[in-house]
Image (spheres, rainbow, N blue to C red):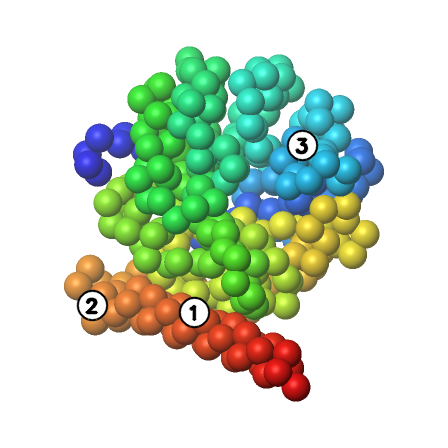
């Protein structure tokens, strides 16, 4: 299957560095916020791609759903001012058409979009014939073939600047992380497509900035190719996902805290065993969560009997 994908670097004209860093706010809220965040990130000198959400698919109506088309000139201007290429999420063909008119040509498909093959195909058709890069987030449910299928649809449309983004998988039980990493799934993707970059989004896995370092380090230890970290000039005032965002200075501190190991030898013991250790750690945490839920249920029954 690996041979079917011809992959080019996400950043046109040069090889992607490792780890590649994608940073920027969850949502583009105002021109001032977008420009301020981009300039601060440029000043820190760690960001390779500036990300900002324009159309935000919220679970329930009534919350901020993004500035929409109005935000595209802000993001294009931020890229111009800083020299950092910009990326946005697209979830409908019209999003792609409008963004291309504003010279934005790096996109990602969100977890809710990737679950719908018809919509992914519509987006692939809308992008066909354009020199664009597309990063594909994993679907909300842990379905590796669905993730691969979205990548293949884009590839078959002639889009070869491709990458995957591991942002974790939805779950219902109480747990410290917002989304389950299920590391075995991105590891499996990397094994099947060795030339496909896979980035990890610790912001969406954690849901809380206090846990970013652990997940980011684990991603690098498992040889993921980069990180997407939500970064805002004033995180506590963010209109969406405030708890998981950091400011540009905190992003630099986070990146400085990470150990970036040299590539393992192809058959080294650590190279082979690290993914298995990550899976065991994750399953241990799941067992603890299940036992905690069971204890809570037993405790509730006890109170009813009193």
> Which quadrant is home to the C terminus?
bottom right
**Residue at left 46%, top 77%?**
291
As drawn, 123 above or below 144:
above
Q: Nearer the viewer, residue 291 or 220?
A: 291
Residue marked by disc 2: 268
Q: Would you say the residues marked 3 and 1 are in contact, meaning their CB atoms lie under 8 Å apart?
A: no
- Spatial CA span between label 3 and label 1: 34 Å
Q: Residue furthest front?
A: 305
Q: Residue furthest bottom?
A: 306
Residue marked by disc 1: 286
Q: Is residue 277 left or right of residue 44?
A: left
As drawn, 12 above or below 192:
above
Q: Nearer the viewer, residue 200 or 60?
A: 60
First of labels 3, 1 by sequence position: 3
Label ID, residue 54: 3
| Residue 158 in picture, x, y percent from top left | 35, 20
**Residue at left 75%, top 30%?**
67
- Spatial CA span between label 2 and label 3: 43 Å
């Amino acid at each position: 299957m690996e041979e079917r994908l011809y992959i080019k670097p996400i950043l046109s004209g040069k090889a992607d560095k490792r780890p590649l860093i994608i940073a920027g706010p969850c949502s583009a809220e105002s021109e001032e916020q977008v420009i301020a965040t981009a300039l601060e990130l440029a000043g820190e000198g760690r960001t390779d791609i500036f990300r900002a959400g324009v159309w935000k698919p919220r679970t329930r109506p009534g919350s901020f759903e993004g500035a929409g088309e109005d935000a595209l000139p802000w993001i294009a201007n931020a890229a111009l001012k800083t020299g950092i290429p910009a990326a946005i999420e697209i979830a409908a063909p019209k999003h792609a058409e409008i963004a291309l008119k504003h010279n934005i040509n790096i996109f990602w498909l969100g977890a809710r979009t990737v679950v719908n093959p018809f919509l992914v195909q519509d987006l692939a058709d809308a992008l066909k014939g354009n020199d664009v890069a597309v990063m594909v987030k994993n679907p909300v449910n842990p379905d590796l073939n669905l993730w691969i299928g979205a990548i293949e649809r884009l590839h078959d449309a002639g889009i070869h600047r491709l990458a995957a983004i591991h942002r974790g998988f939805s779950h219902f039980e109480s747990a410290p992380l917002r989304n389950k990493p299920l590391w075995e799934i991105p590891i499996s993707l990397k094994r099947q497509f060795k030339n496909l970059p896979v980035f990890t989004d610790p912001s969406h896995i954690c849901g809380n900035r206090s846990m970013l370092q652990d997940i980011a380090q684990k991603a690098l230890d498992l040889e993921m190719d980069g990180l997407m970290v939500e970064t805002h000039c004033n995180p506590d005032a963010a209109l969406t996902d405030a708890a998981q965002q950091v400011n540009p200075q905190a992003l630099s501190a986070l990146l400085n805290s990470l150990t970036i190991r040299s590539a393992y030898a192809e058959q080294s013991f650590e190279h082979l065993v690290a993914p298995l250790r990550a899976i065991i750690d994750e399953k241990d945490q799941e067992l603890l969560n299940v036992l905690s839920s069971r204890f809570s249920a037993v405790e509730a029954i006890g109170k009813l009997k009193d």
